[in-house]
Image (cartoon, rainbow, N blue to C red):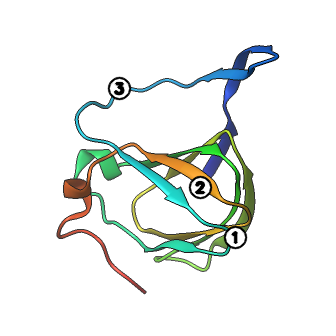
Amino acid sequence: MVKITPLQQIGSDDRGGTFVFDNERTGQLIVAQRKAGSISGGNYHTGKHPYKVPEILVIMQGNCTLRWKDIHSENHGTETVIGPAQIVIPPNIWHELKGETDFVMLEMNGLDAGQGDTFNL
């Protein structure tokens, strides 16, 4: 259902690490800074916008817990996400992120991608 992939590290030195991931999306993207203990998401999308098919989140720094549930079945799960990592969420998967630490997330879509297609359980 939900796929979490650590980002590929291509370098490391005394400054820190350098990581890469593939991207075909353009336009406005969201950068979110979240505090430890905060909850983000708590919704699902049916996929009306192509950038929600799938929804892609990149945890740039920090750790969070991803809770998810398929709205059409009993499939559900809880995953720990340790940044940097990419989360891929298909349509009709309810999801929420809880900050275990402060974290920074890149959401590979703009706010317009969820308009009229963001639902709560």
* Quadrant of image for the N terminus: bottom right
Quick one: which residue is furthest to the bottom in this view?
A: 121
Q: Which residue is mark 2?
A: 2
Residue 108 visible in image:
yes
Q: Earlier in the sequence, mark 3 or mark 1?
A: 3
Residue 20: % across, % down: 59, 21
Q: Nearer the viewer, residue 15 or 74?
A: 15
> CB atoms at circles 1 and 2 under 8 Å apart?
yes
Q: Between disc 1 and disc 2, whose residue precedes? A: 2
Q: Note whether 20 is above or below 97 in the view shown.
A: above
What residue sits 59% from the left and 55% below the top?
A: 2
Disc 3 element = loop
Inspect this view and state whether residue 48 appears.
no
What is the total number of numbered labels drawn onto the structure image? 3
| Amino acid type shown at disc 3 | Glu
Quarter of the picture holding the C terminus: bottom left
Determine the CA span between mark 3 and mark 1. Answer: 28 Å
What amino acid is labelled 1 in the image?
Gly
Q: Which mark is residue 18?
A: none
Q: Quadrant of residue 90?
A: bottom left
Q: Picture coordinates of residue 35 (x, y %)?
A: 61, 66
Q: CA distance from mark 3 to mark 2?
A: 19 Å
Q: Which residue is mark 3?
A: 24
- Name the residue carrying label 1: 77
Q: Position of residue 85 (x, y in %)?
A: 65, 41
Q: Of marks 3 and 2, which one's residue comes earlier in the chain?
A: 2
Front label number (3 vs 1):
3
Of tags 3 and 2, the one toward the viewer is: 3
Q: Give the residue type at disc 2.
A: Val
> Residue at 35% across / 26% down in the picture?
24
Q: Marks 1 and 2, Cα distance to the nearest angstrom?
A: 9 Å
